[in-house]
Image (cartoon, rainbow, N blue to C red):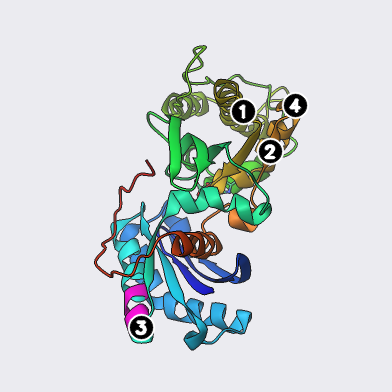
Amino acid sequence: MTLLGIETSCDETAAAICRQGQILSSIVSSQVIHAKYGGVVPELASREHEKLLNQIVHKALKESCVQKQDIDAIAVTSGPGLAGTLLTGVSFAKGMGLGLNIPVIPINHLEAHIFANFLADPTLKYPFVCLLVSGGHTQLWYIQGINQYKLLGETRDDAAGEAFDKGARILGLGYPGGPAIEKEARGGNPLSHRFPRGLMGKESLEFSFSGLKTSLLYFMYDFQESDTMTKRDVIASYQQAIIDTLVEKLKRALKTTKAKTCVIAGGVAANKCLRNQLTDSLGNTRILFPDLSYCTDNAAMISFLGELKYSSENIYSLDFGVQPNLKLA
Ligand code: KG4
Ligand code: ZN
């Protein structure tokens, strides 16, 4: 079967075509308009989606050499995300679904991030632990099968991606903060300053990044570059504090569940330092990362999960709405 995937949960307008588990095309347009505001402006994001979505969908069709009439179903992100941006994608999908007389399948964005790992390795076996690290979520999941998810721990305040974004703003770097911090940290000494690591008590599988961000804010008030500490060193140390926390909590989750495989999902999974440090410190545990283009928001993961859901469940009703606070379990 052939599925069109649509993703508009935040500031990426994306469409993709998936056929029998293979991604035939994946088009992502990242909205640059938000950079000057240092974060996503929801109203502007909705307007951009509205303007772009039709051409992005047609580009995905053209690149995959698939005709509109060949699509069997449309998978669309229904939550979590920004209400207005989700509405643009869901309304577009419903209109197109009605026009073509095909089903529209609502997809949970978080679940799609996790399942993007099956695109990296279709032989991935359950059970596995997933570290989900995006702009809005930092969670540890125990995945035992499709629809069988157990939350092991999550952040009490900011998400890891948020820590990167807010940290970048304090440091005067661009938006999104993750790639900017990763770039500026290169060559810096990650041990030059020890920023706090939240909730490191022995058993905890929860995260907290708000103290780290505040600590950076105070540190930068009277920071002067010197021979012993450059700004690059501070940036590398800040990034290290985030990475250390993620690595340690994932290790604990693996110990608790005795799982032999773990996967990383969400935009922060694109961070190469995180990838390297996880690979170095997880010993014999099998670790999977999605392809870089499938870490940050994309529609390939939406179309792929849509196909899985379509074959296992029959969802034909258009009577669903957007769910900005949709949970996974
Ligand atoms: O999954 P995603 O694209 O959107 C959400 O579902 O939230 O994640 C976006 C987040 C942003 O906070 C961004 O700064 C972060 O992922 N991110 C990174 C990197 N690339 C994106 N964080 C660290 N290093 C990166 N290379
Ligand atoms: Zn996402």
Left or right of 67, for residue 230: right
Q: Main secondary structure of the magenta part?
A: helix
Residue placed most toward the observer, 317 or 65:
317
Residue 263 sits in which quadrant? top right
What amino acid is labelled 4 in the image?
Gly
Residue 48 sits in which quadrant? bottom left
Look at discs 3 and 2 and give the one toward the viewer: 3
Image quadrant where one finds the C terminus = top left
Q: Which residue is rendered at x = 45% and y = 64% of the image? A: 310
What amino acid is labelled 1 in the image?
Val
Residue highlighted by disc 4: 283
Residue placed most toward the observer, 39 or 17:
17
Left or right of 302, for residue 118: right
Residue highlighted by disc 3: 101
Q: CA distance from mark 1 to mark 2?
A: 12 Å
Mark 3 crowd level (few <14, some 14–19, many ≥20, 10 Å Cα): few
Provide the residue span drawn in magenta: 93-98
Residue highlighted by disc 2: 287
What amino acid is labelled 2 in the image?
Ile
Q: CA distance from mark 4 to mark 3?
A: 51 Å
Q: Position of residue 256 (x, y in %)?
A: 55, 21
Look at discs 1 and 4 and give the one toward the viewer: 4
Image quadrant where one finds the N terminus = bottom right
Tag 1 and tag 2, C-beta contact below 8 Å: no
Q: Which residue is rendered at x = 43% and y = 75% of the image? A: 53
Residue highlighted by disc 1: 247
